[in-house]
Structure formats: C-alpha cells, structure tokens
Amino acid sequence: MNHAVPAEVVTPAVMIDVDVLDRNIERMAAGMLQRGIRLRPHAKTHKTLEIAGKQLAAGAVGLTVATLGEAEVFADGGTTDIFIAYPLWVEAPQAERLRKLAAKCAIAVGVDSAESATQMGRQLGADAGAVNVLVEVDSGHHRSGVMPGEVVDVARAAAAAGLTVAGVFTFPGHSYKPGMPSGAASNENDALGHAATALTDAGFEVSTISGGSTPTALIDSETVATELRPGVYVFGDAQQLELERCSWEEIALSVAATVVSRHEATAGNVRRVVVDAGSKILGSDRPDWASGYGRLPEYPEARITALSEHHATVVWPDDAELPQLGRRLRVIPNHVCLAMNLVDQVTAIRGNSVVDTWKVAARGRNN
C-alpha cells in the first residue's frame, strides 16, 4: 500500500486511491459473475455518483441504499434500479417521494410487518403497485426482520395493500465479528432458503432472494441468493482488515493526517503522537474486538487508543522511531461508511498525485 500523502493535500482529508478502488470493484463483480449472482452494492458506503457509476459499469444490476434521500440522489444521478434495504414506515410525505422515485426508476423497499405493509399501501393508494417490496428475514443479526416462518403473513398483507411482493432479503450483520463470517453466511443461506420456500408454497412468485455483506460476499459456498448487497468492499477499512476479509493492499480509503504533537516515554507514560484527525473525520466506531480506533498502514504495530473531535492519540511501538512533528501519515478508519458521511468531498489520487475531487453527493441524506 502506498504510504505517501500528495503534497497538495491539506490534512485532515479523506483520500481514495482510484487504482485500488477499481481493482476492488472489478474483483467483486467478477466474483459475483462467476457464482451467477446479481450484484447490487450498498451505496451508503460511498455516497458518491462517481463510484456508483463505476460499480454499474462493472456489471452491478442496480444499487442498494439506506434511505429515501439516498435513493433520490442516485435516481437523480441516473441509476435506474434501486432497493431501499430497510423497513419503512410510510406517511403521506414519504408516499409522495416514493411516487416520484417510481416515476424515475424501478424502486423496491423492505417491509418486516403486516402493519407497515398495510400502512404503505394505504398511503400510496392507486400507486401502490408501482413499488416492489421484499420481506426482511432475520438470519441471526437480530436487528429488523421476521423469522423465516413469518414471512407469508407479511407478504399477504403487502399484497392485500396493493404492493408488489418481489421476494425476501436479509442482512447477516453478525458476520462483523472475528470467526463469524462463514457461520453467518450459512445462517443467511438457511434463513433465505426457508423464507423463499414458504413464500413459493403460499403462491407468491419469488423473483429476488437478496442477501450479503462484505465479510460474507466472497465466501465460496452454496447459496440460494439471487443477489448480494456488499458495500464496504469498495474501500476496505480497519474492521475488514482485522476480520481478515481484506489485506492492506486492498484498502482504497485513507485519511491523510499530520503529526501535531509527539511524546517520548516519560514518568511512566507511553510513547505516543497526536495527529490532526479525530472522530469528526475518522468516525468513532470501535467494536469491542477491535484493536483501536483505526490503523496506520506504514506502522502496523501502532494503535489509535483515543479520539477527540479533531485529534487522535497514537501509541507507538517501542522498536519504531517516533515520527517527527509535521510528518504526514495515512490513517485507515475502522468504519469507512462513517468517514464518508463526515466530509463534503473526497480527494481521488493515483500514486502520489491528486487526479480529481468527488462530491459526497448523498452525505447527510438520512431521511
């Protein structure tokens, strides 16, 4: 992985290595093509039209998003097939936005209760048939979603409300723990298989069986899924690195930071430096299994032990020279989705050169 920070970059700044990004996009697209599975990447990770365009050009059938606002940004940017992969509670304002989306692109949304499906159909009225719904299944993450045996009741309510039932989906979020990706992939396959069979037996035509997360997407195992929705794979991050789902060379996003304070060990304190990138650009996610708040590719043994809003404290290994004040370093965030939502634009680089600036078009579109 390149460790240099281009001279024209003012720290702190989010940088995207375009060569690595392109390789990540091509690798995932090729992996899905080889398995005969449609790829519908989750755009909440990057929120940029430029990266979405690369994913679609590489063969993605459409995009996954988290919110109506994100869907609107990508539909306005030309994406013609979008799935909002969360259960929505639709009141009149949301219904009007769904109508406008349906006029621009194929739109699908998640449901996980008969009540929300009935409410959505009621608010959409005569336009309900223009919106596809997928019933969400809980495959072990225990967030939203119903158990596989409960999907038929939700689907029947959706159909009675005039919505078009297209299939089932799940998110194996429990894959984001050490040792869990393979087991989560198996849980996902079992849950989706049982749910899809239940819908088919009840007379529904199941055209979409949707799953996937970055930790599980490239696990080469049998799956009933017709499409997968990984997101973080485009960039990689410190979580994926420590889960051993990517290598240093596969990390495309880093935060350029400058050493603004340094301290050799005195009076029992640890050797440390402070850089000018804190929680307001790195994000503050730290799972209980993570070794810190991010990683430094040039110094794999260093650990970010504390974050303030604009600074990070990095504990330095005893056998490495403490960097001098003014030294520019790259920091890999734990969770890139947060980092992208914290900046208005990102710097696209190739090698040691800046090649473009990309607007984070869907930043802050949280509803």
Image: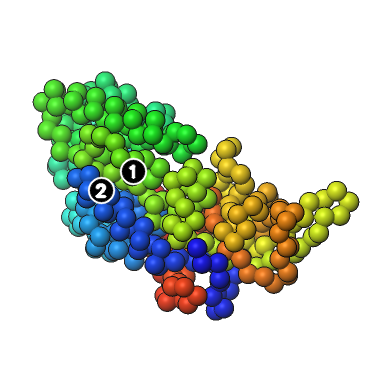
**x then y, percent, for residue 13:** 55, 67
Residue carrying label 1: 217
Looking at the picture, how far across and down is residue 348, in whole percent?
44, 70
Dot 2 falls on a residue whose secondary structure is helix
Picture coordinates of residue 292, whole percent (x, y):
62, 47
Residue nearest the observer in this picture, 98 or 134: 134
Query: Mark 1 near mark 2, Cβ–Cβ under 8 Å?
Result: yes
Q: Name the residue under label 2.
A: 32
Q: How many marks?
A: 2
User: Along the polypeptide, which appears first: circle 1 or circle 2?
Assistant: 2
Q: How far apart are marks 1 and 2 (CA)?
A: 8 Å
Q: In this view, does 162 lie to the left or right of 243?
A: left
Q: Is residue 94 visible?
A: no
Residue at point 61%, 66% (across, down): 329
Mark 2 crowd level (few <14, some 14–19, many ≥20, 10 Å Cα): some
Seen in the picture, residue 110 relative to 318 is either above or below; the reply is above
Neighbourhood count class around disc 1 (C-alpha, 10 Å): few under 14, some 14–19, many 20 upward:
many
Q: What residue lies at 41% left-to-right and 63% top-to-bottom?
A: 20
Disc 1 marks a residue whose amino acid type is Ala
Residue occupying the point 37% across, 50% down: 231
